């Protein structure tokens, strides 16, 4: 790794927010204070992902209080992955920091992240030390998900690494060049590569309210990640089909031998019914897995934008790149 100049870079900090009005009042001042200690040239991008509370109102008021704050108000709730993409597309800093708006990502770590960047790392990402704030079942499911994902993927996606990270400008531009509509950001971070450094951290308690990321959202995101970065389900179908075919041939050979050596026996009704139901279930499962992949292809072919912006408030950093980055 080649060390960078000690000159303070311009920093963009992206805060995707969904129903985080109460937390923004506390989080934004803390982030502003932390960034002011690192550089005088920064912006904070609050991406309102179709919140139903007063998130947009609070963000507008904070824009008047803090000149470096920018509100990007999406037209509806597109999901966190789309909100992150909107913030990344709008970011103009030499480095971009991604944080949650609930206060669980400690701003005290920003200095260490920037120092690792100065030492030559293009990506500095935070890895949770533990999942004590989650149930044992949820933690176990997350562990199984990453094992399945990495088993069938061509890249290594770090377990327990979330969106809390610092990225160099060239990494941001690489992410902007990816055309996927169904985005699994944790996989895209790993796919683009570049020199990366992991640092451990312990998430803080939420400042207010409860997480909006429920079991259904976790399952949907996990499914998106597996379909986008792993062919393991398709390989499992192929292996399962071979095993079932092998079993059928062995059973056929057994029936022939039984016929010639032990005479004809009337097959049991229960055996036939169970076999039909089993193979019907396998076929429906196979069709369902194939449909997930085909459905994602259909979404990509339509080429709808990943998000739509209904309003933007605040100046932020000046665009140092003459190219105008598209919003979708």
Image: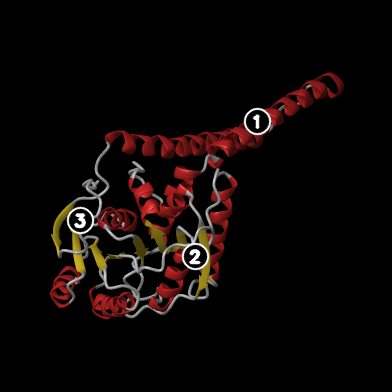
- Percent across and percent down for residue 269 are 64, 33
Residue name at image x 19 percent, y 65 percent: 71
Query: Which quadrant of the view contains residue 239?
Result: top right
Q: Are marks 1 and 3 in contact (CB under 8 Å)?
A: no
- Residue 204 lies, in percent from the top left, at 43, 78
Q: Is residue 109 left or right of residue 210?
A: right
Q: Earlier in the sequence, mark 3 or mark 2?
A: 3
**Extreme-top residue of the structure:** 260
Q: Which residue is mark 3?
A: 76
Which residue in the rendered view is the most extreme toward the right? 261
Q: How many marks?
A: 3
Q: Residue at x 57, y 57 (%)?
A: 144
Q: Which residue is mark 2?
A: 119
x and y, in percent, of residue 28 in the image = 26, 76
Residue 271 versus residue 38 in the image, above or below:
above
Which numbered disc, 1 or 3, marks the residue that appears first in the sequence? Answer: 3
| Callout 1: SS | helix
Calculate the distance from the C-alpha at mark 3 to the C-alpha at mark 2: 40 Å
Question: Within the image, what quadrant is residue 87 found in?
Answer: bottom left
Q: Secondary structure at mark 2?
A: loop
Q: Is residue 66 found left or right of 264 in the rendered image?
A: left
- Camera-side mark, 3 or 2: 2
Q: Which residue is mark 1?
A: 242
């Amino acid at each position: 790794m080649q060390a960078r100049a000690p000159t303070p870079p311009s920093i963009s900090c992206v805060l995707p927010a969904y129903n985080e009005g109460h937390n923004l009042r506390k989080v934004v001042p803390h982030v502003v204070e932390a960034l002011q200690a690192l550089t005088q040239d920064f912006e904070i991008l609050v991406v309102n992902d179709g919140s139903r509370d007063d998130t947009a109102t609070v963000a507008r008021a904070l824009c008047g209080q803090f000149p470096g704050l920018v509100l990007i108000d999406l037209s509806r709730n597109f999901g966190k992955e789309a909100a992150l993409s909107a913030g990344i597309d709008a970011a103009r800093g030499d480095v971009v920091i991604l944080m949650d708006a609930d206060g669980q990502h400690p701003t005290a770590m920003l200095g260490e992240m920037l120092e690792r960047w100065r030492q030559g790392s293009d990506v500095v990402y935070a890895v949770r030390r533990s999942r004590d704030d989650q149930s044992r079942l949820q933690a176990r499911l997350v562990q199984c998900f990453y094992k399945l994902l990495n088993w069938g993927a061509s890249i290594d996606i770090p377990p327990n690494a979330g969106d809390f990270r610092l990225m160099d400008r060239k990494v941001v531009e690489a992410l902007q060049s990816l055309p996927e509509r169904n985005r699994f950001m944790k996989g895209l971070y790993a796919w683009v590569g570049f020199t990366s450094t992991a640092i451990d951290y312990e998430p803080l308690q939420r400042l207010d309210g409860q997480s909006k990321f429920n079991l259904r959202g976790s399952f949907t995101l996990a499914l998106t990640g597996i379909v986008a970065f792993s062919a393991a389900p398709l390989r499992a179908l192929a292996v399962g089909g071979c095993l079932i075919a092998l079993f059928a041939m062995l059973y056929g050979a057994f029936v022939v031998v039984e016929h010639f050596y032990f005479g004809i026996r009337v097959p049991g009704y229960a055996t036939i019914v169970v076999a039909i139901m089993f193979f019907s279930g396998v076929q429906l499962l196979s069709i369902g897995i194939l449909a997930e992949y085909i459905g994602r292809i259909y979404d990509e072919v339509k080429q709808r934008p990943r998000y739509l912006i209904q309003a933007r408030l605040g100046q932020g950093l000046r665009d140092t790149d003459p190219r105008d980055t598209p919003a979708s």
